[in-house]
Image: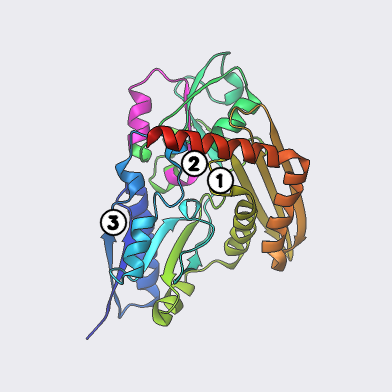
Amino acid sequence: MMRTIFIGTRGSDLALWQANYIKDGLESFFPDTQFEVKIIRTTGDQLQDVALSKIGDKGLFTRQIESELLNGNIDLAVHSLKDLQTMQPDGLMIGAVCEREKPNDVLISSKYSSMAEFPRGAVVATGSLRRRSQLLNLRPDLSVVEIRGNVPTRLKKYRESDLDGMILAYAGLHRLKLDDEFSHVIPTETMLPAVGQGAVAVEVRADDQTVMEMAARLNDVTTHTCVTAERAFLRRLEGGCQVPIGALASVEGSSLKLDGLVGSLDGSVVYRDSVIGDADQADGLGTKLAESLIERGAATLLDEARRDSIEKVDAVL
């Protein structure tokens, strides 16, 4: 009897696009195997009215899906890589990282074609501390407000508001064929993306050799190398708290360049640097860059963010 491989995912339009992208890829390699997408509702989907910075986002969009995977109710899980914790739960592993989409953030605005055009006091929405920190570092005169929800929900909220702009990821809009919604692709020199932004990850059980080998067919080596460096950078820094952190790696030949930053919550201080080394030392390069920023002063920002995170979580509870 043919085995059905169940693919676990969140139920948003973007998550379903990603799950079906993986499903289509697997079907092309394994036409004699049946694949079925299973929607799993996560904590992050349920808490749409609470800012992520107030509740912490460690596993908010993955924990229930990973539980279903560990329990054998699904055979693999599809995630936006940026949502995954930097360490997988015991028994799970990343089986593949697909070729990355453009990792940039984009500006959505019906009034202005770039951030440089914003007048003093312009109101910009984002649900990301990373974007908030970099926006305020670039333009401390802006007013940055919280916005939550999946891509269509945020777009609807923006259209019904008097906001001057909103920042989202290019990848999500592009995959949903919503390129007409944004007015400007923000250069990564101006705003570093989240770790793993634009990449889709396939998570599998470490003891399921069959599914592991299937997932491996979808792995893009260059993307996997880049996100390995970025995730090592984040792992060394995060300490379980909400901190504005951005990173982006690129590979040219056998060389890898990693740019990374740590910022204050209000954007008044941003530490940013880069490191270049052998691509086969991606993990070590990520750790090296993190330690360099810690030595320059990022440790103070991390401590402050931890205290702030604890206070906010206590207030919510």
> Who comes first in sequence, dot 2 or dot 1?
2
Residue 304: where, in percent of width, then height? 61, 35
Taking 68 as reference, is 132 above or below it?
A: above
For residue 84, the mark is none
> Who comes first in sequence, dot 3 or dot 1?
3
| Magenta stretch contains residue 161 | yes
Q: Which residues are magenta?
A: 153-172
Tag 3 secondary structure:
loop
Mark 3 and mark 2: Cα distance apart in space:
23 Å
Residue, disc 3: 40
Tag 2 secondary structure:
strand
Mark 3 and mark 1: Cα distance apart in space:
24 Å
Q: Quadrant of the C terminus?
A: top left
Residue 11: where, in percent of width, then height? 29, 51
The local crowd at label 3, few if under 14, some if 14 to 19, many if 20 or more residues have their Cα within 10 Å, is: some
Mark 2 and mark 1: Cα distance apart in space:
9 Å
| Residue 48 picture quarter | top left
Residue 156: where, in percent of width, then height? 33, 30
Taking 187 as reference, is 160 above or below it?
A: above
Q: Are marks 3 and 1 in contact (CB under 8 Å)?
A: no
What residue type is disc 2 on? Ala
Q: Are marks 3 and 2 in contact (CB under 8 Å)?
A: no
Q: Are marks 2 and 1 in contact (CB under 8 Å)?
A: yes
What residue type is disc 3 on? Ile
Residue at point 31%, 72% (across, down):
72
Residue at point 43%, 66% (across, down):
203
For residue 194, the mark is 1
For residue 169, the mark is 2
> Who comes first in sequence, dot 3 or dot 2?
3
Residue at point 34%, 28% (across, down):
157
Closer to the observer: label 2 or label 1?
1
